[in-house]
Amino acid sequence: MLKTIKTAILGQGRSGRGIHAKWLVKNLYDKFRIDAIIEPLEERRERAEKEFGCKTFEDYHHILDRKDLDLVINTTPSHLHFPITLDLINAGFNVICEKPLAGKVEETDKLIKASKKSGKLFTIFQQSRYAPYFIQVKNVIDSGVLGRIVQISIAFNSFARRWDWQCIQDYNGGSLLNTGPHPLDQALQLLETDEIPEVKCVMDRVNTSGDAEDYVKLILQVPGRPVIDLEISSCCAYPNFTYNVQGSNGGLQGSTTHIDWKYFKPEEAGSHELVRRPLTDADGNPVYCSEQLKWYSESWDVPENQKNLFETITTEYYRMIYRVLAEGAPLEITPEQVRRQIAVIEECHRQNPLSKLY
């Protein structure tokens, strides 16, 4: 029988409790056991002891000398991800860090160097890699029916006003570091290259009470690859797609729950030769180029058992982690992959310096 992973979780906020602990206990209790919770707020420690039957501590330094923990998950506030993750790696733990991993490439490189020295697992909670809609989009693109992909538009948009700590620059807040790691990780996977793309970015501060951005328009380009148009906006009252893919033989558009795509088959459509003289009909009247293509249409709906997106992607992520730790499977989300993401984010901030208000 395979081992049960003895786990400690740092933090019991919306992520630590509502995502990590919740789904580990509900769906993966036979593979992961929560042994310790670290949380500075007393009421949250008391709640964790009742909910998970585990030990709790106020400060993570209380576990740094332990040798019996198989995994430590860092879900502390974003600006603490780098220093605490570095301490955990240097203490010899297998470590998962919540996104965003860091704000700068320099910090990411320090974590990668430390993890290589430790020889332990180090990865980032980029669970959106396992989103059913993303897998479906990638499957359609990879099938080739859309032809050569010219542009992939990704929109994580809504209309919302925000006033919590995650909209403060000093806390690594803002839409790009909060929401951005999800679509940006997907976008970099679709580019299918280790090359860091050329970045063009516009950011704005619109409906937030903080001093970080809540509007991001990002264009990513790599020669020979599709253009990525990524938008994260909190001032979009009419969000109408998550993905829109343009290809030489057709296109795709859809949300997280429903996707449509249509395409024609080049072998059925025939080819055209360029005509330099004006086009006319049989009566000699000027006409515009026109043809009747035979379109094929398909659609996808998220399966009933995958409609809870957070449950699905978190469970799949931790199944992957279990395979790595208990069965020796290769890690599917590497720090080097996430380093490219951090490089893009850092360049976006360089191009759009926002004044600090707090």
Image (cartoon, helix red, strand yellow):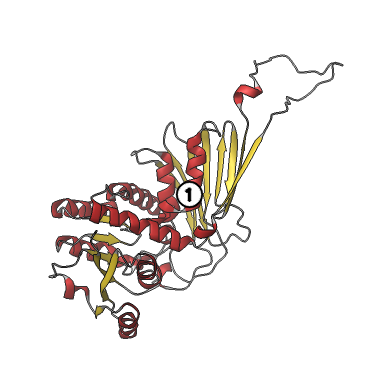
Q: Is residue 283 left or right of residue 265?
A: right
In the rendered image, residue 300, in percent from the top left (x then y), is placed at 58, 48
Q: Is residue 187 left or right of residue 111?
A: right
- Does 75 sit above or below residue 124? below
Residue density around tag 1, few if under 14, some if 14–19, many if 20 or more, within 10 Å:
many
Q: Is residue 195 left or right of residue 108?
A: right
Is residue 352 shown to the viewer in this render?
no
In the rendered image, residue 120, in percent from the top left (x then y), is placed at 18, 55
Q: Which image quadrant is residue 42 in? A: bottom left
Q: Identify the image quadrant of the N terminus.
A: bottom left
Please, what secondary structure does the residue beneath circle 1 have?
Answer: helix
In the rendered image, residue 56, in percent from the top left (x then y), is placed at 25, 79
Between 251 and 20, the one lying in front of the other is 20
- Does 4 sit above or below residue 283? below
Give me the residue at 35% from left, 52% from top. Answer: 346
Is residue 334 shown to the viewer in this render?
yes
Q: Identify the image quadrant of the C terminus.
A: bottom left
Give the residue type at disc 1. Phe
Q: Is residue 119 left or right of residue 346?
A: left
Residue corresponding to mark 1:
134
Between 211 and 39, the one lying in front of the other is 39
